[in-house]
Structure formats: structure tokens, C-alpha cells
Image: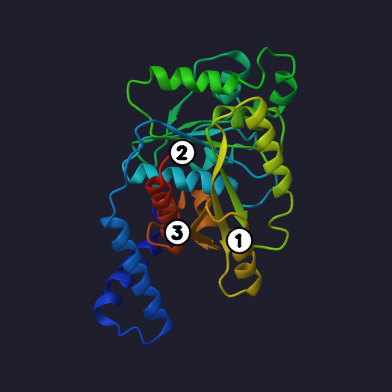
Amino acid sequence: MKHPEGDVTQTLADNSAASFDESTPLARELAEITRRRQALDADVLPLPLTTRVFTVANQKGGVGKTTTTVNLAAALARAGARVLVIDLDPQGNASTALGVEHRSETASVYDVIINDQPMADVIQKSPEFDALYCVPATIHLAGAEIELVSLVAREQRLRTALEKFLDESPEQFHYVFIDCPPSLGLLTINAFVAAREVLIPIQCEYYALEGLSQLLTNIQLIERHLNPKLSVSTILLTMYDSRTNLANQVAQDVRDHFPEQVLSTLIPRSVRISEAPSYGQSVISYDASSPGSLSYLEAAAEIAHRGTPA
């Protein structure tokens, strides 16, 4: 379901470039939206030669982790990439936002990790885009942390299943995004072991960097002992409000600490971004011309053009 206001926004933006002199704030905003959308439409994103696997993680809750996972995946799929989202959060919010079935009886990532079911048997196609797929999470995943403790190679189970799936897939997947729960348990460790890149969303609010040093320490431990190819390749600033000094200060602090990893794109606070999951959609399909949607499309383009880190 496309939100009707999206069409109005796009029409106004198209008209603004031609008919407004940009002398008012509304005219300037609409003209800027038009310029951004035209630049995105003209940009052809490169596809990676090998699959890029991202774990989207932050031990702090409420930072836009699942929102970022879903919208970056949808943006890349819209641009022509073949994308898989693995929902590793027992809440199943990524599954909901991608419009895939995840009731308790649904075959899910739980069956893959605990029961060794092939990933090909549980993957679902998202109605969002033809090239967007999801391995859903169900409520059974809530008990997986305890069940994993006694299993052989408990930290490697997701990686083993994912590598087998990617090797046997008749068509190449260009991107895999793993959405983690907001804690460092065995599920999150499985996600770190399965990935090569870590993407950390950081909200532009007070206490934004709280817990980040511990997360980075944990990533370094996993890199040292379980996955030497793992690195923090991308940091995305979310919930940005340009009207506040605090948001600008937080953004600058993060850029000072991580100049190579932080994307130049900022994700704004947006009603459209918040509304989209209730319709079982990403903001990319819910309202493609909204500022929030454009920001995620721009962030996805940055990730694609940056390519795989050396």
C-alpha cells in the first residue's frame, strides 16, 4: 500500500523546481527533494562481485537498528541488487516490516540454527521487491539462546547454514543483512561470526555513544577468536534533527571518532519512517519521495559505491 501523500509530495516537488523561485522555506525544501530524487534516479549502483554480508548491531536499544536493516535492504533491492535479510531478533520486527509470514508455526531462522534445516527451505520472498528476500524470525527464537548452549559449534551455526545456502543458490545474492537482538548473546555472536562487515546505527541523541566502546571491544574479541575477517565498515547516524544543537554535536563527535566508517548521509527523524512498518512495508515503498526514504536511498548508494573494505 503506497501512501497517497507520497504522490502529492512528489508532484509538489516536481512542480517546485519549475514554478517556485525558492524564496520560501517550503519552496526550497521541495526543490531540494526534487534535486535529491533526480540525482538518485540518475545514479546506477555497482553490484559487488561477491556477496557482502552485514551484521547490523548495537547493544543499545531504540537506535533504529531494524529500521535501518529493512530500509537499506529495500533500497538496494530497488536499485537492482539481490538482497537477503536474516531476522535474528525474536521480536520479528524485520519480518513484519518486510511483509513476510512469521507466525509461530512458520519455518524460520530458529529451525535453521537449532534443527539444521536448510536455509533454502525457510526463505520467503518479500512482496516489497522481486529481488528482496527474508529468513523470518518467530517467537521460538526467544528460547534459542538457551538451546544453543549445548549444541556443537554453537557460534558457527548461522555461518555454516548461510555459506551453504549462498554456495547452492542458483542466483547470486549481492547483499545479506542480519538484524540482531539488542544484546550480546549467542544469537548476536552467531551473526558476527557469519558476517564480514558490521554496520552500527547510532542515534543523534544524548548517551548515543554509551555502550559503544563495549560493543567495539566485543567485536574485536570475536574478530580475534572466531572471525578474523570481521570489521566495522559502516556507521550510520539516525534520528537526526538538524534543529537541535545536541544532534549536530553528537554527529560531529561520532565523525571525529570514526572518520572512515561514518556515512555522510544522515537519517532524519521522520513520521513516514515510523509509520511504514505498521503497513508491513519499508519506507522505500511506503512513501518513496519522503525525506526519510530519500535518506535511506542515499545511504544505500554510499554503501554500494564504497564497496567491500580491503
Q: Position of residue 263 (x, y in %)?
A: 49, 55
SS for dot 3: helix
Q: Amino acid at mark 3?
A: Ser
Residue at image point 47% right, 39% down: 99
Residue at image point 56% right, 71% down: 242
Q: Counting other residues with Cα less than 10 Å from the Cα at mark 2, is it few (<14), some (14-19), or many (20 or more)? A: few
Q: Earlier in the sequence, mark 2 or mark 1?
A: 1
Distance of label 3 from label 2 (alpha carbons): 26 Å
Q: Is residue 138 left or right of residue 125?
A: right
Residue at image point 30% right, 61% down: 39
> Vertically, is 115 above or below 40?
above
Q: Which residue is mark 3?
A: 295
Q: Position of residue 42 (x, y in %)?
A: 26, 57
Q: Is residue 105 visible?
A: no
Q: Amino acid at mark 1?
A: Asp
Q: Quadrant of residue 170?
A: top left
Residue lying farthest front?
Answer: 310
Q: Quadrant of residue 12?
A: bottom left
Residue 256 tag number: 1
Q: Which residue is mark 2?
A: 310
Q: Is residue 215 left or right of residue 3?
A: right
Distance of label 1 from label 3 (alpha carbons): 22 Å
Residue 294 tag number: none
Q: Counting other residues with Cα less than 10 Å from the Cα at mark 1, is it few (<14), some (14-19), or many (20 or more)? A: few
Is there a contact, CB below 8 Å, between mark 3 and mark 2? no
Q: Quadrant of residue 231?
A: top right
> Vertically, is 213 above or below 308?
below
Q: Position of residue 297 (x, y in %)?
A: 40, 54
SS for dot 2: loop
Q: Amino acid at mark 2?
A: Ala
